[in-house]
Amino acid sequence: MRKAARWLRDTLSYEFRDPALFELALTHRSSSGQSNERLEFLGDAVLDFVISDYVYRAIPNADEGDLSRLRSSLVKDATLAELARDLDLGQHLILGGGEQKSGGHRRGSILADAVEALFGAVYLDAGYDAARAVVERVYAGRLESLPDPRELRDPKTRLQEWLQGRGLERPDYELLGVSGKAHRQHFEVRCTVAQIEATTDGAGPSRRKAEQQAAERMLAELEEAGS
């Protein structure tokens, strides 16, 4: 654990008072004995609060929906896994033999869980302020360049808002076709804004995904034409 402790100190400027908590945070359930699952549960709550507090203060004019979407984009598993890879956390994980052989130290879900477990362990080790500091160090790059919350909205919602803001009716979505087997279907959809005689097509593994792509394309065309 000395190498891991040195990594933590050098990377996140933190040293555990109780090294056993740090070891537990790195221990996947595939290993024998206790695992980091309980710490993950706690760390998830700590992370949600820290990020909620940060975005609330950073974007005072954002409404609840935008704040929720922004928080969700920051705390989702895919983001956590990216952060873990940036930190090289995987090399310090304690895995069972099977997970080691199958590359568990690179698996997104395991990395995401370990990051949350680390936050939970720091909280138990030194309290909320210490945990918040570690979370903010992990997220430093992302917190410095927060995206516009409006860009995180569903493309269909953004298109509808764009049209309504110009006195135009809602778009119509028509299912053009469905192909493929039941477990791997492919949907094709057409988005139409009748008042301006504009149409775009979209495709995806679900009708919702296809509609989103069609809406995204429609919005891009309308914004380009209006620029």
Image: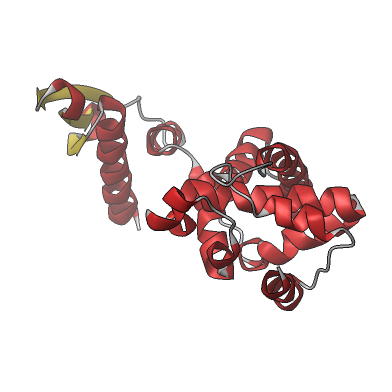
Left or right, 30 with reference to 192: right
Could you tell me residue 32's position as x and y percent?
A: 61, 44
Could you tell me residue 145's position as x and y percent?
A: 61, 65
Identified at 59% across, 56% down, the residue is 94
Left or right, 162 with reference to 174: right
Q: Quadrant of the C terminus?
A: bottom left
Left or right, 74 with reference to 48: left
Q: Quadrant of the N terminus?
A: bottom right
In the foreground, 82 or 205:
82
Total of numbered circles in the picture?
A: 0
Is residue 105 depicted above or below 215 in this figure? Answer: below
In the foreground, 17 or 176:
17
**Tell me, what colour scheme is on the image?**
secondary structure
Is residue 134 depicted above or below 150 in this figure? Answer: below
Could you tell me residue 165's position as x and y percent?
A: 46, 36
Could you tell me residue 121's position as x and y percent?
A: 78, 51
Q: Is residue 151 visible?
A: no
Is residue 47 depicted above or below 141 in this figure? Answer: above
Residue 63 picture quarter: top right
Q: Is residue 7 visible?
A: yes
In the foreground, 60 or 164:
60
Identified at 43% across, 49% down, the residue is 98
